[in-house]
Image (cartoon, grey):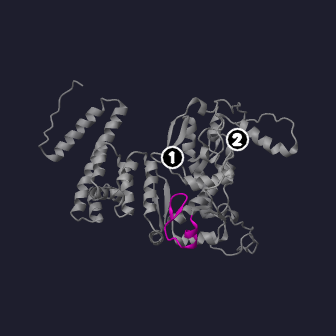
Amino acid sequence: TGGPTTHINLNGDPATVITDLMIAVEHVLVHVPAQTALQLLEFCSRRIDASEARILADRYENGASDRTVEDLVRSDGKTSKAEAKKRASRAKATNANPDIANRMSNGTMSTEQADIIATAAAETNGAAACNTTLIEDIASTSPEQGRKKARKFVNDRLNADQIQNRHDKQERQRGWYRHRLSNGNAAITFHGSDEKIDAIERKVTAGADAEYQADGGRDVPRHNHPRTNDQRGFDAAHKLLTNAGGAAEAGPASDTGQTGNAGQSTESAAGKAAPARKTVRDVVHVNVTLDQLTGNDRSAIIASDGKPLPRSVFNQIVCGADIIAHIFDGNGELLWQGRRKRLATPAQINGLIARDGGCVQCGAHHTKCVAHHLLPWEAVDQGESNIDNLAFVCDDCHVRLHQRKLTLFYDPDSQTWKTRAALPHEVAPENQHHNPKTSIGTYPSKPAPAQNPSSASNARARNRNNSRTPEQSGLPRLHEARNNRRRGALF
């Protein structure tokens, strides 16, 4: 830049050398474009993380314990326990395979990807850190897809006894604590087994869906809703925990510690009959073989969201669940609807849960996902409602695909889902569903032609669909997809 030149003596005091280098880096970054500056910062950050991993890996090589390495990381008093564990885990993986730190240094692997490998290595006694195929797969794809690959790698190496032992350990360590977030909000964190946390999440999600309908659902434009998704989720959890919505909000008797047959009234403290409660079963989707069902095969049972299922939890599900068989061979006419149906059928929704598990892009749980047409229904080429033209995506990913006009596709070589710019024949017409707003912010239906009563409901549904703006049409049909799901457990 024509300014003064700074000379750094690399043979001087190490602390002074590092300080002078960082000052020089900051000086350079001020004079380059923002995008270049961020790329350079990421480059520096990865190399620093790689150097730290090598230094801590040497401690492991010399026999140091996890606690010793974590205490070393926290010696400055400014690092949390969780962060120290993560960095120690990264170093332990580097000690098992130095190539991890080398990849971070040369830019072929990010720190986040290295942490995915380190987490998998901790669950497989170091095997993930030395598996060249897994490392290549994670380094060549996004962190979201990398987590799915690492999870599969771990699950493939667990047996039923290991999963049960992990579940029992989580149960022993269950608990909760109150704390305060960085934004100043108070928070309560519950921690325990995956299965019970999933059950809590399903209850909150169902309550949040009810709050969404109370706010107007799809009949009200998204920006006119009085609450965000997070706010509705909090309000639903508050009602569940405090019974703010009354006895009807408390759920099944088994969830509140009360006894009695489902669907019958119980006596309240005041001596009056409480309203009858309707038992609603949780939806648990599990892919299981006949040998696993009978106990002849002791291999790990994996739920459709990719999580291993302890045998004790699986037995509880079998005792009180409706079993729906998924047969992947045959003609599959239920999964191929062509142009006969616009929305995914219940059979297709269950099939997507079994096949995709959750969002194929970010890995979000299937309760937050909807069926997305790979080739849009309204496109020039007219996409069909067939299982091979559908994929599960979450709310955020669904909106992004439509707004950015991206085509989602499965790459068989890398066995991951990817996106590309949609071609002209793959994009729905911009103004196909456009109607002007009314004064109250809703969208009027087109006048319906004369029709017989039997087709009135179908006509109203078509009018509602035709009255939506392109933005509304791109929003996920969360409540419609969830209503399609069967109440019961999928095997």
Q: Which residues are magenta?
A: 288-308
Name which residue type carries label 2.
Answer: Arg
Q: Confirm whether residue 112 shows in the render.
A: no
Q: How far across and how far down the image is residue 66, in percent?
A: 30, 64
Q: Residue at x 43, y 45 (%)?
A: 142
The disc placed on residue 361 is: 1
The reply to whether the magenta stretch includes residue 168 is: no
Dot 1 falls on a residue whose secondary structure is loop
- Looking at the image, residue 8 lies above or below residue 251: above
Percent coordinates x, y for residue 438 in the rendering? 73, 33
Residue nearest the observer in this picture, 186 or 427? 427
Q: Which mark is residue 481?
A: none
Residue 130 quadrant: bottom left
- The image quadrant of residue 343 is top right
Q: Quadrant of the C terminus?
A: bottom right
Q: Looking at the picture, does residue 191 appear above or below residue 427?
A: below
Q: Secondary structure at mark 2?
A: loop
Disc nearest the viewer among 1 and 2: 2
Q: Nearer the viewer, residue 235 or 33?
A: 33
Residue located 28% across and 51% down the image: 99
Q: Quadrant of the N terminus?
A: top left
**Which residue is located at x 66 percent, y 41 percent?**
384
Q: In the displayed orientation, state which residue is furthest to the top.
A: 2
User: Along the line of sight, which residue is nearer the eye, 293 or 78?
Assistant: 293
Residue highlighted by disc 2: 339
**Residue 200 coordinates in the image, percent (x, y):** 57, 62
Cα–Cα gap, marks 1 and 2? 26 Å
